[in-house]
Amino acid sequence: MLELTLIQFLVALCMGLGAVCVFVWAVLSGLFNDVEAIKYKAYRTEVSEDE
């Protein structure tokens, strides 16, 4: 039982570290600089598809 718990902990730890790495990469790449622009871009795409 202890082996299973240790494996689950290691898998969860790896997934958490992976998520942190992706977040840090996104911040350093500048993906969070202008979060408002993507909202308007998505809106314009939806409006143009409806016409």
Image (cartoon, helix red, strand yellow):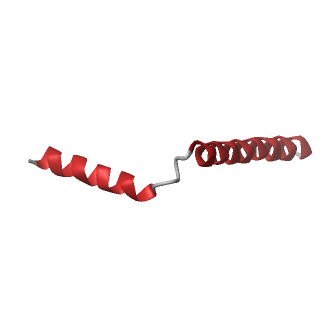
- Residue positioned 52% across, 47% down in the render: 31
- Which residue is farthest right? 2
- Which residue is farthest left? 51
Image-quadrant location for residue 6: top right
For the residue pair 46 and 25, the one nearer the viewer reads as 25
- Residue positioned 35% across, 56% down in the render: 39
All told, the count of numbered labels is: 0
- Which residue is farthest bottom? 36
- Residue 24 in percent (x, y) is at 66, 47
- Residue positioned 63% across, 45% down in the render: 28
For the residue pair 1 and 20, the one nearer the viewer reads as 20
For the residue pair 40 and 49, the one nearer the viewer reads as 40
Left/right placement of residue 41 relative to residue 18 reads left
Q: Is residue 43 above or below residue 11?
A: below
For the residue pair 9 and 43, the one nearer the viewer reads as 43
- Residue 32 in percent (x, y) is at 53, 53
- Residue positioned 16% across, 46% down in the render: 48
Left/right placement of residue 6 relative to residue 36 reads right
Image-quadrant location for residue 17: top right
- Residue 51 in percent (x, y) is at 8, 47
The N terminus sits in image quarter:
top right
- Residue 47 in percent (x, y) is at 17, 52
